[in-house]
Image (cartoon, helix red, strand yellow):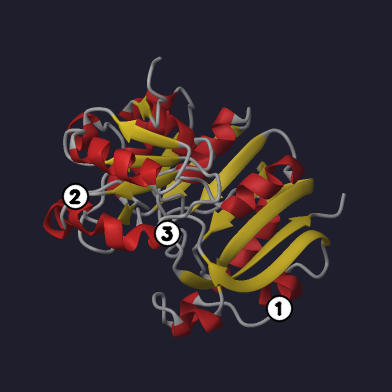
Amino acid sequence: MAPEKRFETISGDELYRRLAVGKPVVVLDVRTRTEFEQRHIPGSLLIPLQDLESRCSEVPNSGTPIAVVCEVGMRSKSACTLLSEHGFHPLYNVTGGLKRWTGPLASGLEPDKHCRHGITPSSFLVENYDLLRKGLVLDVAMGEGRNAIYLATRGFDVDGVDVNPKAVAAARAAARRLGAPIRALVGNCEDGTYEIPFSSHDSIIVFNYLHRPLFDGIKNGVVPGGVVIYQTFTKEQTRFGRPKNPDYLLDPAELKSIFADWEILRYREFIGPARSRGEMRAVAGIVARKPA
């Protein structure tokens, strides 16, 4: 009788595709802290293999797939065996480890600002993208394109703009690799290098970025009947970490006030754990439709 299969394997390309299109996956890195600091998959959880037995409780076990990664796929195989013995499932060993990973990488214990939210699109976007007006979407401060790529895979025509040339180059490369074409532009929305054209987009999305003088440009850039999805941190975030500058943090109910003359389809302010890594965060998000 064949032994029961305790875990599956997954290629780095397939893992990247699942993350990029919003499928829930916990990425568990079982290398050493030093290896992790040098490079890791953005948004991954670090628990070195030698510590995993005593720290199993830190790994989510709610039915979300767990993809375990190391350098070449050997330590992760051992970790999958251990986790399966503790009742974790479903489990996937990333074949070839980071040696075969073709997606973006971050360094340090905290990923850099363009990777710090990982590869997976924002859960607020995944929950509400069906409220966007179909057609041309602009992603403001797109970073490495996690949200823009997600919308492209959902049939939207997507523009993205970011001030960082390296982030834009990474977004373009990722979009090509995933077969999700986007138009990614380098531009500064704060100094006039890039201005949102008037009534140019069916929808505009903004995540984890705040420049208050840009709100008029965002509202004017959407066609009548178009939709804005906006989510970023509130001033309560200073209790948990970056950002701490009040210029980049929303006041209570500020988004609701800014879009008070629009139809508010969804609104939330909450304090709770981030989906990808579990750190506490304080955010506000809105989905608003411009009057026709």
- Secondary structure type for disc 3: loop
User: Mark 1, mark 3: which one is toward the viewer?
Assistant: 3
Numbered mark located on residue 253 in the image: 1
Kindly check if marks 2 and 1 are in contact, taking CB atoms under 8 A apart as contact: no
Residue at the outermost front position: 1
* Left or right of 34 on screen, residue 231: right
Dividing the picture into quadrants, the one containing residue 288 is bottom right
Say whether residue 113 is visible.
Answer: no
| Disc on the earlier residue, 2 or 1 | 2
Q: CA distance from mark 2 to mark 3?
A: 17 Å
User: Which residue is pictured at 69% across the width and 59% down the height?
Assistant: 219
| Disc on the earlier residue, 2 or 3 | 2
Provide residue 42's location: percent of width, then percent of height: 33, 50
Q: Amino acid at mark 3?
A: Arg
Q: Amino acid at mark 2?
A: Arg
The residue labelled by disc 3 is 277
User: Which residue is pictured at 70% across the width and 48% down the height?
Assistant: 128
